[in-house]
Image (cartoon, rainbow, N blue to C red):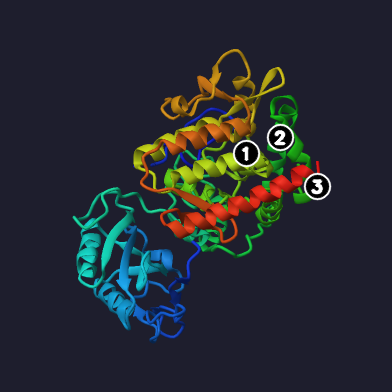
Amino acid sequence: MHPVLSRVSHRLTPAKTRLLLSTNTIGRFYTTPAKKYGAYILPHIPHKHSTINNHAATTLRPFASASDPTKDIQGSQNTTIYFTIVDRVGALEEVLGRLAELDVSLTSIESRPGRHAGLYDFYIDFLASEDKQVAHAVTKLAKHVKEIRVVSTGGGSTPGDLVEQRQSAWFPRRKQDLDLFAERVLSYGAELDSDHPGFTDDTYRARRAAITKLAREYRTGMPLARIVYTAEEIATWGQVYQKLEELHFDKACREYQYIKPLLVANCGYGPDNIPQLEDISRFLKECTGFTLRPVMGLLSSRDFLNALAFRVFFSTQYIRHSSNPFYTPEPDVCHELLGHVPLFADPDFADFSQEIGLASLGASEEDIKKLATIYWFTVEFGLCKQGNGVKAFGAGLLSSFGELDYCLSDKPQRVRFDPEKAAVQDYPITEYQPIYFVADSFKVMKEQVRSYANRLSRPFSLRYNAYTETIEVLDEKERLIRMANNIRGDLSRLAEAIEYI
């Protein structure tokens, strides 16, 4: 993967940072654990007027651990295969039986009526250890289905002649798919490098390990763990909070300053209390639909950006070492809650963040690198015009008293935000930025990134369905008609509302 900063490492003084590598359907089936045998079975959910599923559930090969299916994702790549079968008794069981023989781990199955009567389309997600295994699966299944192609694979290469040529990288289609990222951290978390302030502090290391363990065990839909922070941790938070509070008054953007008091009133923000992710997540959900999710450490650019498509922000819960409260070599709870969180309550900023996330789904490695760089110059180190001046909105700036002063001084270069230029702009990671991009507004910035994303090389269009919290690939007429009808309904309500104004 490309070496780009994804989950941005930041601190309050310039120092070494960490580089990162970078449908609604008629029927939907997901593998579920069988309690007694630890196997995965396909639930019996028949289609109306169909013989496809009118038989007993088919037992599939289990994951290495039924209690924690993500444990054998290390070294495996997520792969999605699309195939069409003729509606007849035993057709699906026949195909799944061939998959079981291939010794692959299924993660989900999605079905829908085909474009023509008597046909059904299936999307199957499974874990493959290498491209050869994917190619073998396609060849094996081709004998039993009408049409087959690989939609996406984590390998990023074409494993065989039967694979769709316009292939894209695997991407999550359900919010639950983000659970697969739980252990895919690149660095930090419970482990510390020798230059970390807490490296020789056994008590601190044990504390970090306990907090990251909670993040590792979290799954979609669970309440976020409440951390009982120690007096020492709260004191560290308090020093950072008060120092930044002085600077935010005249340097932070107006949206940040408007939302911060709301966080104080609703989420317990203050110098004497470290807010809980659960309380903040509920508040953000009511404001813009964004939610927080605990993470063990730094994620790859792709994984981190993909989550934004679902309006999910990965946040750490541990705090920097008390010996140096104004320095941290990686994101901590101070950076997350004082830098990132407030603006996720702003509708335009939330929309902008999701646009970057949607653009990252199925994107090539080259495009992921560009999107991560745009993220760097906006969400982390962005400036915006306000009134007759310029204000900071980037989390890396709002959580750094040193760079917050510097970015608005006459020392760095400031240029108007252009995603085409920002995407390829080099940047240092061991010192303050020599160049900052200034956005006209969050709304304009969102439209610019949306236009930029439309020009990326991706063989499909997609949308986020907020009702089901899923990603829909717009690849069939019925789905497009449904989308058009939704838009028509919204326009009708808009016209009606305008009449009352």
Q: Are marks 2 and 1 in contact (CB under 8 Å)?
A: yes
Gap between marks 2 and 1 measured at Cα: 9 Å
Q: Which numbered disc, 2 or 1, marks the residue that appears first in the sequence?
A: 2
Q: Dot 3 lies on which element?
A: helix
According to the image, label 3 marks what residue? 265
Q: Are marks 2 and 3 in contact (CB under 8 Å)?
A: no
Of tags 1 and 3, the one toward the viewer is: 1
Q: Amino acid at mark 3?
A: Ala
According to the image, label 1 marks what residue? 349
- Which residue is nearer to you in this view: 81 or 113? 113
Gap between marks 2 and 3 measured at Cα: 16 Å
Q: Residue at x 62, y 43 (%)?
A: 350
Tell me if 355 is positioned left or right of 265 in this view: left
Q: Dot 2 lies on which element?
A: helix
- Which residue is nearer to you in this view: 132 or 55? 55
Gap between marks 1 and 3 measured at Cα: 21 Å
Circle number at residue 106: none
According to the image, label 2 marks what residue? 255
- Which residue is nearer to you in this view: 142 or 372? 142
Q: Amino acid at mark 1?
A: Phe
